[in-house]
Each structure stands twice: as C-alpha cells, then as structure tokens.
Image (tube, coloured by chain):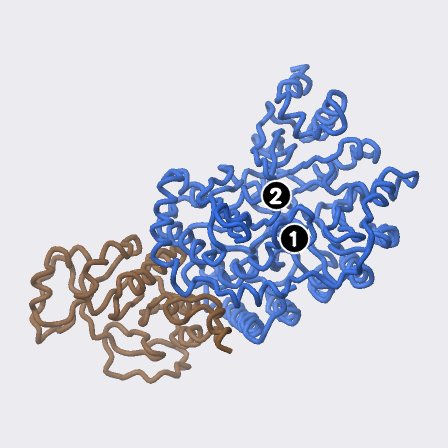
Chain colours: A brown, B blue
Amino acid sequence: MPGADGSLNVQVSPAITGRSIIRDGALVRDEWTWIDDDAPLPVLTRARDVLVSSARWRRDRAALLTRGGRVGVRLQTDELAASIADDVGHLALIEIHVHKFVDGRFYTTARLLRMRHGFTGELRATGDVLPDQLFFMRRCGFDSFELRQDKRVETALRALESFSVVYQGAEDQAPLYRRRALG
Amino acid sequence: MYRYDAHDQQLVNERVAQFRDQVRRRLSGEISENEFKPLRLQNGLYMQLHAYMLRVAIPYGLLSTAQLRALALIARRYDRGYAHWSTRQNVQYNWPKLEDVPDILAELAAVEMHAIQTSGNCIRNTTADHLAGVARDELEDPRPYCEIIRQWSTFHPEFAFLPRKFKIAVTGSSSDRAAVRVHDIGLRIVEDPDGPGARGFEILVGGGLGRTPRIARRVRDFLPRRHLLSYLEAILRVYNQYGRRDNKYKARIKILVDALGVDEFRRQVEEEWEHIRDSALELTDEELARVSGFFASPAYEALESSDAMIQGWALGSDRAFGRWVAANTRLHKQPGYSVVMISCKARGKAPGDITADQMDGVAEIADAHGFGQVVVTHEQNLVLPDIKSSELHAVWRKLEALELAEPNVGRATDIIACPGLDYCNLANARSIPVAQEISESIDDYDYLHDLGELTLNISGCINACGHHHVGNIGILGIDKQGEEFYQLMLGGDAGEDAALGKIVGPAFQRDAIAGAVRTVLDLYLARRESADERFVDYYRRVGAKPFKELLYARS
C-alpha cells in the first residue's frame, strides 16, 4: 500500500494486487496484463486485456487482434507518435514509458496521438512519472498514470489540481483567448 | 501596459501555492534535489556558488513604478539591499533563502509579477526592443505580441521539458535593438509584401551564442499575424521531437537547424503548421485588440519638436549635462518628448547592479516626470520612456543625486558582463573585476565621448552569458592550467547587421587585458576616417590586421 504514514485519503480496494493506476482522480486496480516479448500469449480466461511492446505488436498483430481481448501497446520515450499512427484504431490502450521525466518528447507524442491520429482509447504514462508533472501530462491527453513507486498518491492527486486557469489550448481546453471572448 | 484580469491573477496565485508546496516537500525530504531542480529552475531559482539566486520575470522588460517599488522592497527585506538586471530584461536577487522564496513570490504576485520559466529547459521570458512604443523607426509596437506569446508559453504543457532553454525576441523597428538574430526564434514585424497595410512577421530561427554561436536563419519571409501562435507551436513541436537530448551543448535548436539544413527544417515546420494553422490557435481579432489596447500611447501633451533644443544641449557649454544628453537620451516619436536611458554601469560598480534606494528613486522620477513606467534593457540599463524634453535637466539632476547619471549608454564603458567566477559555478574566469578595470581605465569623459557608439561584452566562460560574440569588442575568460586568461574578439554586432566577433590572437593574461582593450581603442581613434565612422564600421573596413600588429608587436 502506498502512503506509509497512513495519510492516504483515497479509497483503495484491499483486493488490489500488482499495478495501481491513477485514473479519474482515484487510485484503481490495473486490469491490463503485460506480456513479455518472448512469452506466449495467454488464454483469454487468464488474461483478457494484454499489453505488449510495439515490436511484439508488429510481429503478432494478427494473433493479438483475433484472440478476443483488448490490445494495448507500450511505447518507449524514443518511439514517437508517427511510429504507431496507422494502428491506433486497433488499440484500447497506449502506454508511454517515461524513461526520464526531463525528456519531454512524450508530451508531443501524446498530443499527436490524440489530435492528429485520433486515438480515443486510454493513454497512460508509466516509468519516471512524478506528481509535479501530472498536470501537464493530463493536458496533453494522458488519462491514466502509474506513479513511480516511491511517490505519494496523495501528493499526485493534489498536483493534478494545481491550476484552475490555463492560458493555451491543449487536449483538454481551447485557448483562454477563445474562452475569454465568450465572457 | 498589460494589466492582469481575474484569470491572470488566479494563475500566479496558484503558482505561489504550488511552489510553496514544492518547497515544503523538498525541505521535508519528500522530493530529492534531482527532482526538485527542474521545478525550482522553472521558477527561476538557481543554485550558485554561494547561495540560491532568484530570477524574477519582467515580461519584455516593462515595469510599472508600483512593480519597481516592490522589487526594491524585496531587495531590502529578503536580500542585501540590491538587485541585478539580467540580459533577458529580468531581475536577479543573489542572496534569497530557499524558505523565503514562496513569500517573495507572494509579494510579486501582489503586483502582477512572477518568476515563471525564468530558467530551465522551457520557453523563457520573451524580450523586445526596449524602445518599443516610443521609437521613431518603429513600424508597430511589438509588446502586444510579446504578451500574447507570454500567455501562450506560460505553463505550456507540451513544452515544459524541451531539449534545452528556448528564447524568443520580437522587434517592430528597422534598427534591431532586441538582438533578434541571436535568439532561438527572432520575430520581425514587417509589412505584407502582397498587401500594403497588413502586417505579419519575418521568422528567424536558430540564432544563439554559447559554445556554438550562430546567426539565425530565415525560415519564413512573411507570416500573417493571426498565425503567430500556430507557427511558434509548429517550430516548438519539431524541436521537441527531434532536438538532441544526448548532449546539453548540442541541444539548442540552432544545432537541429544545422543538422537538418534550413530547407529541411523549414519543410518539417511548414508540414506541421499545415495541420494546425486553421485550428483554435489562430489568433482572434478580439484578442489582438484586447491586448493591443493595453499598450496604447499615454496622454501626451501637444508640444513643439524639441530636436533642435536637444542638439543644442548636446553640444552646449554645460559639458556634464551635454555629455549626458548626447549619450543617455534618445529621440522620441512624440514631439517635445525624449527617451531617457539610465546607466546602471557606473564606474567601478558591477554592471547591471542597482540598490533598493536607487530603484525607489527611479520610480519617483518616472511618476513625477513620466507616465509611471520604466523599461529594463537587455544591456542591463533602464529606460524612462516618456520624459518631456523641457524637464530633462531636472531629471538629470535627480539621477545625478542617485548616482545614476553616468553618461555612457551605448558607449565603451556600458559593458555587458556575466556574473563570472565571483558568483557563478560555471565560470572559468572573473568578469566583473575586468569590467571594472576597463571602465576605470577609460577615466576621461571626453575620450569616452569621442569613442562614440561601441559595445563591449565580457563572458567568464564559453557559455557566453555576457554575449561576448556580439560585442564590437568581446572578451572571453578562459582557464589555462588554473590561471585566468582572456581572449579578445573584434567585430561582433547584435543588431540588424548581426555578426560574430573574431578572435584577434593569443589570449591575454589577467593583468594585460584592460591594456589590450585600451590599445584597440587608441588605434581606432587615431585611424578612423572621421567621428562618423563607428568602431564597428572601422573594423569592417580595415579588418583585424592593424589591431593584431599593434597588440602582438613585441611577441
């Protein structure tokens, strides 16, 4: 359980095992199963929704699409939006693994997946995901986050609400100058 | 000037709360210094040699007197009674305590100021011509566009972690006082070549100083102004994806433009731009009108031209006043008014430093004789933009009393210098003592006056914070086996004829550099065609050879 000091004010199901994800302002259990590149695809009854690397996706695309469950792909920081653009219609989850939080390429990847390539599934950040960047990530189109393990969920949820005003347009809002004009 | 509405105020208030929370978590150990570093940098908080340094944003250099008084108050209450103007038209405090910074930010927010994005690998304070709004050669005031860019870039969620810092400058005049050609993006307001009356921007990209100095390349001849933000966003998006991140010294956009070639870079930007040009990023006429309205001219009195009177003073028998008028005033677009340049480069003082009392004094003058506004220049001086020419003598007297009447703006002792080894942990050599020594060696005001227009810039290391590449005379401090040496460069220019200076020859020892500068100045004075031939013009005509011969004659 996160929050060693017991100050966590989020309802967490005691049944949670494995990964916990911040989604819609709460900590929830992750329903996705990561499959290593060399592991066999699991039967549907054991794991319905599977997450694979982009290499595995390209290799086993047909098998993944016909097995019946949902498919997600994990991108590394250096895999930019164009690398998966043609496939987004088949995917229910795109996870971007943040290698180092200061390497900001993934913000553009996220925005392009949403606005250019029309990805409407879940867009998730994992890896070096820290509370103080979540606000920016969400504005760029991320809707779920796996916080780095040593970070406090409480801080992260607070950071998501850092600002009630934003100037520029992104994946959540139009630019303020268009909203100001409306009064 | 721009005034905050409820949205703008809410945003800076929330920033103060956010940073207060971040500092608390840092002090409690919840976040490591490595994680805190980019957070504090994006709030202008550096760790320097002896202490934290806080850099406060002054958007395009423009301050109200209320803001200037608040800066003075912060200098007294939280620092050692002084502050320092930076070359990005910002202000720096050298001795704040980390735990005080949230309170300082709250003081700033109360006067519509902040420290957002004054450091870090993000879009920095957008700079502008310091004579914006009052220059005679101005086509259009650049400040409304700077404010629009400020708002667009403030907490832009996509561009907070770029490969490297990113600097934008805007000018609306034919004379380039904003050094737009040595910025990551330089914007020049120009007329539409196809439709007179319509305005837009010439777009220059990939200029910069540092280890790999570059003059910006032209990416677009004309961009209609309504597309400003979509085009900036396209440039930033290409850079954020493809700029190098493996080596911080190769990470600026100039290196990407070099690597791709300007034609391929332009193709990628234009391709991205085609996707977004007709999106919500397109500026609305209402927004342009709303922001421009804040920069309308003040209520000038209808007066006769004062040009002849000013000329008379400059050449007149009161030499102290005349020298000051000649060096420290500029012709104003409005008849009967003058622009006053306040030198923060007094002899023997650290260039760009100002005391709290001086700040209060300048605020008093701006209220009594102007319209309550002061501008910080990227040369680390101040401007009183709207002074009635008939009051120049009174203003000069007051500035003299404040020790702010050094008659040297745009002259050889108006030195741009970085903090250097005395303050900065990157520096290889001292900058400020060298600047002081040079300005003390030019102890004769007639000699200084005679030298005329000349820029002299000093950096304490190759990161070039003192802009040595674009000084007519540039000095770079280097380290040779633990000893400070200084390279001398000539011919640099940050203006519309932008050029990078060239190294004259072997570097000089610490005790020889001021003498070498004097040799250069004496040679120019002795050999120029006339007083109308500026130092940089003379250098362009004759090249480095005569300087080289004289400087290295004995070796």
A57 and B375: which one is in front?
Answer: B375
User: Is residue B403 or residue B434 the one in the foreground?
Assistant: B403
Residue A64, label in figure: none
The residue that mark 2 highlights is B174
The quadrant of the rendering that contains the C terminus of chain B is: top right
Relative height, residue B80 to residue B190 (above, below):
below
Of badges 2 and 1, nearer the viewer stands 2
In the image as oriented, which residue stretches furthest toward the top?
Answer: B554
| Secondary structure type for disc 2 | loop
**Residue B200: where, in percent of width, then height?**
51, 52
Residue B357 in sight = no
Q: Chain of mark 2?
A: B
Three-letter code for the amino acid on which mark 2 is drawn: Ser
Pinpoint residue B171: horizontal percent, then vertical percent.
59, 49
Residue depicted at 30% across the width and 65% down the height: A114
Which residue is under mark 1? Answer: B132
B451 vs B456, left or right, is: right
Tell me, yes or no, if residue A51 can be seen here. yes
Q: State the residue in front, B473 or B433.
A: B473
**How many other residues sit within 10 Å of disc 2, few (<14), some (14-19) or many (≥20)?**
some
Residue at x 24% of width, y 65% of height: A94
Q: Amino acid at mark 1?
A: Ala
User: Nearer the N terminus, badge 2 or badge 1?
Assistant: 1
- Give the percent coordinates (x, y) of residue A16: 24, 79
